[in-house]
Amino acid sequence: MKTLKQSMPGRAMLLKRVATRFKFLFMHVVVPKPLRTFGRHPLAALVLTLAGLAAQPTAAEELAKNLFGAKTLPAVAAPQSIGFYSKGCFAGGVAIPLDGPKWEVMRPSRNRRWGHPTMIALIEKLSRDAAADGWPGLLVGDISQPRGGPMLTGHASHQIGLDADIWLTPMPDRKLSINQRENMSATLLVDEKTHLVKDAIWVPAHMRLLRRAASYPEVERILVNPGIKKKLCDTVKGDRAWLRKVRPFWGHDYHFHIRIGCQPGSPNCKRQDATAPGEGCDKSLDWWFTEEPWRPNKNPDRPKARDVMTMASLPAECQAVLDGPDPASAEVVTYYGDGVAVAAATTAPVLAAAPPPARASVSGTGALPASVNAFAATPEIGIPLPRPRPGN
């Protein structure tokens, strides 16, 4: 190659030119004076070295999952979800208490009992309504980290405080110890080979629990294992409109996943696409019972999004959430259903957020709007048709 046969100063000039092409990685590249250690082709060696380094995050780009996973308390601000369910964060989060009249939080050491106030209120309300339907009580799985964001392990979503997992195992008639909550196994309702529900375990109360969760207008999706969706399609009688919200997905054989829509006061929350029309008991469900969904991953070593996602991958507002002030303690931002806790800013707000919705008064204290208050009187709830999505 004629270029490589140039004089040593000429080689240095060429190397300088190559370095400028990688200036987004190396802002100050110093090209040594004769590059004897690179052998006969110093230019090719440097290009290979730079290309290898370009494939890795620089030291300054710490993974977002580590930054958000290290936060033990929410950012003090008006409640606001930012970004999408699988790429975002949230401010002004509140925690569900570890114990309630009809719920217990599982795996408490994960510190994933945080969510947007509307999400926490809805879980508490579901626990009461489901009890009236005959379900003993909720075992609450992961909701979100205190400030959302990518998790250290597990979920791709659950990042903006609007997702929650509820076990399909009923709450026992005794209080579980912390050790039991950390180690107790959930009941798997689906046969791993046939992908069908285990009829010896499935009871009508499972259906009523899912129907109740789908009845709330805030809920846009409920994710379940395909076997559970098929069981519902095969057995639900009468009004079946609520089945549109119940969507099949991998996993979800011991819990169901509640997802609510973007809430008022969250202008930077990205909505999900609307569910397809109909009950979902059609060819789209049949596909799950072919070989295709269960074939081995063609690229099992491909890193998960959370393992490469940096702060630059998230909405810019998430940096302010990450840097926001802590509340005095977890207790002051724990929501008991009577307006005790909302992480509202007492100093300068963390974000340029839209003002929070007006609050009603319950028991003489400030509270969430009555429409999302978990302990507001429960009306007679039919199974409504899914709400049409508002125009953008």
Image: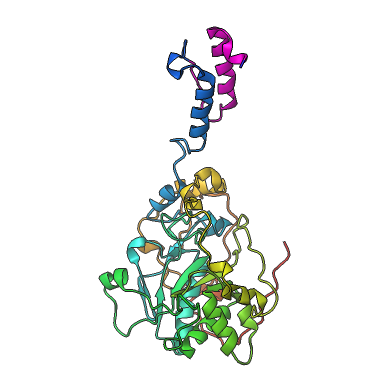
Q: Residue at x 40, y 80 (%)?
A: 169
Placement of 350 over or under 180, stated as above or below = above
Q: Is residue 20 located in the magenta-colored stretch of the structure? A: yes
Q: Position of residue 271 (x, y in %)?
A: 63, 61
Is residue 294 on the magenta stretch? no
For the N terminus, which image quadrant? top right
Rendered-image quadrant of the C terminus: bottom right
Where is residue 252 drawn, in percent x and y? 48, 72
Say whether residue 338 is visible. Answer: no
Q: Is residue 294 left or right of residue 186?
A: right
Residue drawn at x 56%, y 27% as measured from the top left:
22
Side of 273 where 132 appears, left or right? left
Q: Nearer the viewer, residue 207 or 319?
A: 207
Decide: is 386 above or below 155: below
Q: Position of residue 183 (x, y in %)?
A: 30, 70
Span of residues in magenta: 2-31
- Image-quadrant location for residue 354: bottom right
